Amino acid sequence: MRDWARPRFFVRGVTAPGSTVVIAGQDARHIRRVLRLGPGDEIDAVDGAGVERRGRIVTAGDEEVVAMLTEGSDVCREPSVFITILQGLPKGDKMNEVVRKNTEIGVGRFVPVVTERTVSRPDPPGAGRQAERWRRIAREASKQSGRQRVPEVLDIVSFRGALEWISPGMEAGASGERLLIMPWELEMSRGIRDALREHRGAREVMVLVGPEGGFSHDEVRQAVACGAVTCGLGPRILRTETAGLVVSSIILYEAGEMG
């Protein structure tokens, strides 16, 4: 079991014991100024692709920390099912929490989507800054929660752009290994559990989550034409920032990854 008292950092070049890695920039300053670590202290070094090793600090400066890798584990603790949340862009800072909380439980990718009923519509410079902030949040949440991979956060796309991005994957997943689900408050005949159990072999699940006003009928029609399976989430209406977390938790539970 990993020693949770050991600080965790994502770095490039995590390889064999005896090699060294360099931690630079903000992480180096955090090690020196906040954690007050120096030569001889231990950290966990993770390469973001599943490899993690214990490292012992050799040299420590405010801009660069060098650590020698020692023992480690090649056991993957990432979920066996890869989840992508295509989140209808919510108002305010709600997307921060969508990324943070879903990263903690194991979601692998986020796609922020401007839909017909989206209220928040940032201009291109603002959209770029927001995406970078969400990537930082995903990285920090990955460190905090012991993830071995940092989820990918794509740039903001339109609803049509999201479906165009999805389509090739759905065609490639004709064998049933990919599933696109769309929680929709007007779907009464199929629940989330039904949708998942009808597609038990899916190793990649994409989830379309609407913004505060939900999806329009036309968007639902377009998504279904792209291969989406609509499903209900019970008799209560969930907030947009809650819906993805609930769906992802159920997906992971059904896959045997929780509980």
Image: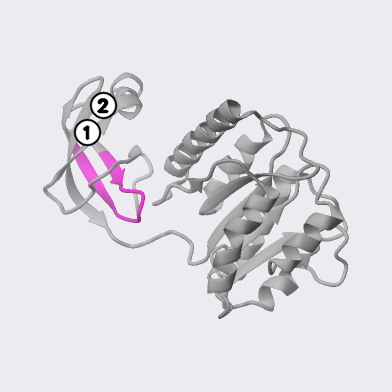
Residue denoted by label 2? 37
- Residue at point 18% right, 46% down? 69
Q: How many marks?
A: 2
Q: Where's the N terminus, which quadrant? A: bottom left
Element under disc 2: loop
Residue 49 forms part of the magenta stretch:
yes
Tell me which residue sits at (24%, 38%) in the image.
42
Q: Label 2 sits on what residue type?
A: Leu
Q: Viewed as shown, does residue 119 lie left or right of 5? A: right
**Seen in the image, is 40 located left or right of residue 216?**
left
Report if the CB atoms under discs 2 and 1 are less than 8 Å apart: yes
Quadrant where the image shows the C terminus:
bottom right
Please, is residue 195 above or below residue 49 in the view? below
| Residue 46 within the segment the image draws in magenta | yes
From the viewer's perspective, is residue 239 above or below residue 208?
Answer: above
Residue 41 circle label: 1
Can you give x and y, in whole percent of width and height, for residue 211 in the image?
A: 76, 44
Q: Which residues are magenta?
A: 43-56
Q: Is residue 248 visible?
A: no
